[in-house]
Amino acid sequence: MSIFKINREFLSADFMGALASGLCVLHCLATPLLFIVQAGATCGEAGPWWWSVIDFLFLAVSAVAVWKSARESNLKWLSSALYVSWAVLALLLVNHRLHLIPLPHMLLYLPALALVGFHIYNLRSCQCVDDGCCVSEHAV
């Protein structure tokens, strides 16, 4: 594998999207642990305001990554899956913050993990980056 290929993968929207979604999952997993070990912390939604802002930062980064990945992908179903996963994640996150409908917090992990998987799949599949596009080989 050449250095150019490695650098292209690290700079791709799919790599950044998978990284952002993965970090989002870790952030969600770490939240209860950080507040339990923090002196005087109570169980529940208590925590610094900036910790909640990180959720929306991950959401914004993943929105850009989904948009760029969907444009570069030649698999239409994958582009749709990326957009749907992001939209479900955004709706669940807003619902979780505003307490609109009582849903388990664990539901947030499903679309976040789906985004990780779809970005990795898209990273490994054929993409149109120049005139030598392989749409006829992989498009569905």
Image (spheres, grey):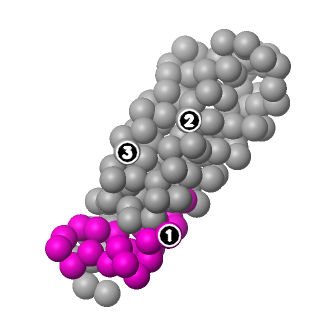
Q: Quadrant of residue 67?
A: top left
Residue 47's disc number? none
Q: Residues within 10 Å of mark 3 (few under 14, many from 20)?
A: some
**Magenta span has 126?**
yes
Three-letter residue code for mark 2: Ala
Q: Which residue shows up at 59% across the image and 44% down it?
A: 85
Q: Dividing the image into 4 quarters, which one contains the N terminus?
A: bottom left
Which mark sits nearer the N-terminus, 3 or 1?
3
Q: How many marks?
A: 3
Q: Nearer the viewer, residue 26 or 93?
A: 93
Percent across and percent down for residue 39 are: 72, 20
Asked whether 49 falls inside the magenta stretch, the response is no
Mark earlier in primary sequence (3, 2): 3
Q: Which residue is mark 1?
A: 140
Position of residue 5 in the picture relative to residue 42 (left or right): left
Q: Is residue 63 above or below residue 21?
A: above
Q: Which residue is mark 3?
A: 67
Can see residue 12? yes
Amino acid type at mark 3 = Trp
In magenta, the rendered stretch is 118-140
Q: Which mark is residue 87?
A: 2
Q: Residue at coordinates 66% horizontally, 29% vertically from top-left?
A: 92
Residue 128 vs residue 114, the one in the foreground: 128
Q: Identify the residue shown where x is 40% and y is 82%.
A: 137
